[in-house]
Amino acid sequence: MRYLNYRILLRKEPESGYTTVTVPMLPGCVTYGETIDDAITMAREAIELSIEDLQEKGEDIPTEEGLLEYILTIEAHA
């Protein structure tokens, strides 16, 4: 069995209290949860379904291997 790692981004939605989750390496893989733990569980399921769909279509499965991440801070002039 092969294990794949995916970075997920969680965003708290102020108007609804839900957490939106995106998976940058899997465009279109978006889900949500009422709590952070719920959102993470939903993200795992969404990733598994996305990978399953890619496999059925015979497409490559993108991975985080070799990915470098850096956060830039930019001064915004209003």
Image: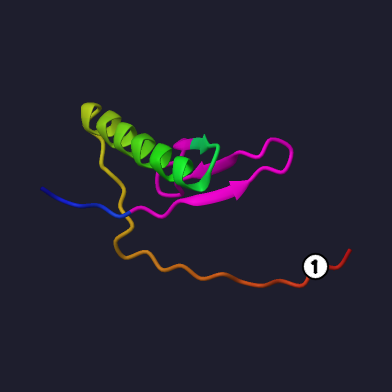
Is residue 1 placed above or below 51 in the rendered structure? below
Q: Which residue is disc 1 drawn over?
A: 76
Is residue 11 placed above or below 27 in the rendered structure? below
Is residue 75 placed above or below 16 in the rendered structure? below
Q: Main secondary structure of the magenta part?
A: loop
| Disc 1: CA contacts within 10 A as few (<14), some (14-19) or many (>=20) | few
Determine the residue positioned at 28% across, 33% down.
54
Which residue extends farthest left? 1
Of residue 22 and residue 44, the one placed in the foreground of this image is: 44
Determine the residue positioned at 32% across, 31% down.
49
Of residue 29 and residue 18, the one placed in the foreground of this image is: 18
- Quarter of the rendering containing residue 17: top right
- Give the percent coordinates (x, y) of residue 68: 41, 68
- Give the percent coordinates (x, y) of residue 78: 89, 63
- Quarter of the rendering containing residue 43: top left
- Write down the region rendered in magenta: 6-30
Determine the residue positioned at 35% across, 52% down.
6
Residue 12 within the magenta-colored segment of the rendering: yes
Of residue 21 and residue 24, the one placed in the foreground of this image is: 21
- Give the percent coordinates (x, y) of residue 33: 52, 37
Label 1 SS: loop
